[in-house]
Amino acid sequence: MPDASCAPLPLRGMIARPNSSGQSSLGAFTYSHSICITGATGPVHGIFSVFFDSDQFDGTIVGQAVAAGDGTFNQVFNYTILGGTGRFAGGTGAFRGDGTVDPRMPPPRINFTFTPTNAAVPETATWAMMLLGFGSVGARMRRHRKLHLPAGMAPSKGRSAGNSLCDALGFSAGLQVVINRRSARRQPAACVDA
C-alpha cells in the first residue's frame, strides 16, 4: 500500500493521458502506469502495464526527475518487466526511458525514447562456432602432448642416467617412437620403460 509520499501531485507523470495508446512493431498497444513522485525533482517509483489486445506485460518503474531550467524536467525511468500474459507469458527483461516532461501544458506530457538494457544473447550458430573452436583447440593440444622434464633431470647425450629422475622412477634412457599424422620418427626420449 502506498504511503503519503505517493499522494497525487500536479506533476503526475502521465504519458499523454491515462491509458494512452500507440503503435509499435508488435502492433497497437495501450500503456498505463501508477507512479509516486517525491516532489517535482526527485526519485520516482511505481508500476506499469502495456496491453496488446489480449496480451500484456507489466513490471516496476524506478527513475529520477531533474529540472532542465526552462520549466521542463528531464526524466530517466528504468523499467523492469516482471511477467506477462499471452505471448509475453514468463517474459522478463528491462528497458530504459529517457525524456522530458512539460508540466505547463495540462495534462503533463512525457516524450520518451525507450532503449533495451539487456545484454545481447548469442545466437545458436555463434554458440556452435565457439564450441567447435574450443573443441579444435583441445584436440590439437591433446594430439601434441609430450612428456617434458625439468632441465638436468633427463640424461643428455654421452652422459649416464645416474641421479636422474629416470633412475629414481626405475626407467632407463632410450628412444621413443613418436607417431603423428605427418610422419613416424624416432627421437631421444627422457624416460622409457626399462
Image (cartoon, helix red, strand yellow):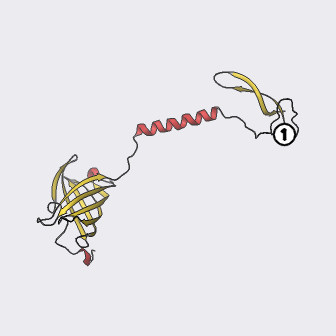
Number of numbered discs visible in the structure rendering: 1
Q: Quadrant of the N terminus?
A: bottom left
Which residue occupies 16% across, 52% down? 22
Other residues around mark 1 within 10 Å, as few (<14) / some (14–19) / many (≥20): some
Of residues 53 and 184, the one drawn nearer to the viewer in this rendering: 184
Which residue occupies 53% across, 38% down? 134
Q: Looking at the picture, how far across and down is residue 157, in whole percent?
A: 83, 29
Vertical arrangement, residue 146 with respect to residue 111, above or below: above
Q: Looking at the picture, how far across and down is residue 116, in whole percent?
A: 31, 52
Q: Quadrant of the C terminus?
A: top right
Kind of residue at disc 1: Ser
Which residue occupies 48% across, 38% down? 130
The quarter holding residue 84 reads bottom left
Q: Secondary structure at mark 1?
A: loop
**Can you name the residue that lies furthest to the bottom here?**
4
Q: Which residue is mark 1?
A: 164
Q: Looking at the picture, how far across and down is residue 192, in whole percent?
A: 80, 32
**Can you name the residue that lies furthest to the left here?**
106
Of residues 139 and 5, the one drawn nearer to the viewer in this rendering: 5
Which residue occupies 26% across, 57% down? 97
**Can you name the residue that lies furthest to the top here?**
183
Q: Looking at the picture, how far across and down is residue 63, in whole percent?
A: 29, 64
Vertical arrangement, residue 34 with respect to residue 53, above or below: below
